[in-house]
Amino acid sequence: MAGTLWIGTRKGLFALRADGARRNWKLAGPQFLGHIIHHVVQDPREPRVLLLAARTGHLGPTVFRSTDRGRSWREATRPPAFRTDHGGEEARAVQRVFWLTPGHHAQAATWYAGSSPAGLFRSTDGGEHWEPVAGFNDHPMRPKWAALGTPDGEFLHSILVDPRDPRHLYIAISVGGVFESTDAGGDWTPLNEGCEADFLPDPSVPFGHDPHCMVQHPARPERLYQQNHCGIYRLDGPQRRWQRIGKAMPKRVGDIGFPIVLHPTDPDTAWVLPMDGQSVWPRTSVGGRPAVYGTGDGGASWRRMDRGLPRSQAWFTVLRQAMCADTHARPGVYFGTTGGEVWASTNGGDGWRCLARHLPEIYSVTHAA
């Protein structure tokens, strides 16, 4: 089974295409040269369809759609935008369309988008027209839920749709926390118990947290994983308290980072790529020795996986959308760096090689079958 890695960068969109054995890869592109590409996602319900979140130099933040596996693209007729009638509230404008998520498999044309500043949007016609999800965007608590920004801004990301129930949604906000809806976005509840917020006077507040990436396993939807600014966590429903599984990581490495990636069929297997989380937050590989860490037991233990990666003086930064896995029986794991390199392991993380160098700063790496 061949596949494509879609690589969103600060200066355009690139693609790495593999042969069936994943031995040979060919780099194609750029498309959208000079534009910022935040996210590219294949529609699992219709694999020929891709959606792309971009910030273009002349159009601003928008969404593009392809119906031919990325050969051509067309901009959405109505991109995500906040409502114009704010009822006395200070006007907000979408600065970045940051995240894209396909809707439930039974809702073939539904998509969700997250923005900066934190906003949630929905399309019911395949990404052509987008509407704000009023239940979140106009929620009376939203100004408090998203009151703090990261050094790079405020983002709504990690939009998750429960495969058992299209009305059951999760979102994450940096900075704000994780929130849950059981009525298709009509109302929301914070879901942060057990997570720490070391940067706040009270680290156990109900909201104000900084989740970096949250994922849900399709084979076990009640299980969520989270890579947070303050650790790695797991939540097993119906419990509502997160467990800090990152405490099993080596203390000299810590459990701070941006991405977390799940095995396609095994809900106990996950991979992270730790970043230096000391007080000034360098956001680089710890000690200049990059490594992926993997767990096969739900975070009870972690194993360093660095064969083939540089042994020293490699100060990688890997952002939240820049790591993914494919769907092979022995999954490939991939990540891109802000230095423009793409690295791959086709044996579940046991060995790594560099597939591409000298690209612009990489914002996202996603796999399309």
Image (cartoon, rainbow, N blue to C red):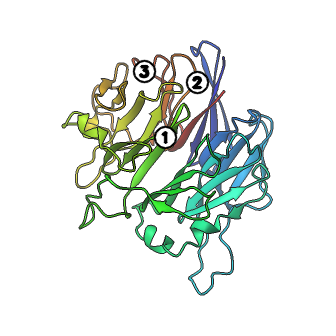
Amino acid beneath label 1: Glu
Residue 14 is situated, as x and y percent measured from the top left of the image, at 63, 37
Q: Quadrant of the C terminus?
A: top right
Q: Are marks 1 and 3 in contact (CB under 8 Å)?
A: no
> Alpha-carbon distance for marks 2 and 1?
21 Å
Instruction: Tell which residue pokes out farthest to the bottom in this image.
Output: 88
Q: Is residue 24 visible?
A: yes
Q: Residue at position x 46%, y 63% from top?
A: 153
Check disc 1 and report the residue beneath it.
222
Comes first in the chain, label 1 or label 3: 1
Q: Which of 57 and 212 lies nearest the eye of the viewer?
A: 212
Amino acid beneath label 3: Trp
- Element at label 1: strand
Q: Are marks 2 and 3 in contact (CB under 8 Å)?
A: no
Above-or-below relation of 172 to 4: below
Check disc 3 and report the residue beneath it.
352
Q: Nearer the viewer, mark 1 or mark 3?
A: 1
